[in-house]
Image (cartoon, grey):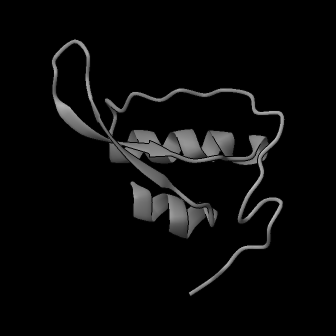
């Protein structure tokens, strides 16, 4: 899913390591910022890759950092 977000949306992804509270399963958590105009395409992509993915969608007032308030850096 990380690679799909990067290639299809040109967005960065932060990887966090976590553990579910209920089943206590180790898992990777992906954090990304998607524009409102890309949200429906993003939700479709997530469902295609993992129909059981747990997704939190929240309104964000401001984002700072590389790719937002600092220009993107491509390798």
Q: Which residue is drawn at 77% across and 46% down?
A: 63
Is the C terminus in the top left, top right, bottom left or bottom right quadrant?
bottom right
Q: In this view, does 69 lie above or below 43?
A: below
The front one of 18 and 10 is 18
Q: Is residue 62 above or below residue 69?
A: above
Which of the 4 image quadrants contains residue 25?
top left
Q: Which residue is drawn at 31% across and 29% down?
A: 52
Q: Is residue 6 above or below residue 19?
A: below
Residue lying furthest bottom: 75
Residue lying furthest top: 22
Which of the 4 image quadrants contains residue 40?
top right
Q: Residue at x 51, y 42 (%)?
A: 44
On screen, residue 53 versus residue 13, left or right, reads: left
> In x, y percent, where is residue 36?
76, 40
> In x, y percent, where is residue 69?
83, 60
> In x, y percent, where is residue 66?
71, 65
On screen, residue 42 versus residue 64, left or right, reads: left
On screen, residue 14 versus residue 67, left or right, reads: left
Is the N terminus in the top left, top right, bottom left or bottom right quadrant?
bottom left
Number of marks: 0
């Amino acid at each position: 899913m990380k690679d799909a977000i990067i290639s299809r949306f040109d967005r960065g992804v932060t990887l966090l390591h976590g553990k579910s509270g209920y089943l206590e399963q180790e898992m990777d958590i992906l954090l990304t910022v998607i524009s409102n105009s890309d949200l429906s395409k993003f939700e479709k992509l997530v469902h295609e890759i993992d129909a059981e993915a747990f997704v939190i969608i929240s309104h964000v007032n401001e984002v700072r950092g590389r790719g937002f308030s600092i220009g993107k850096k491509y390798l």
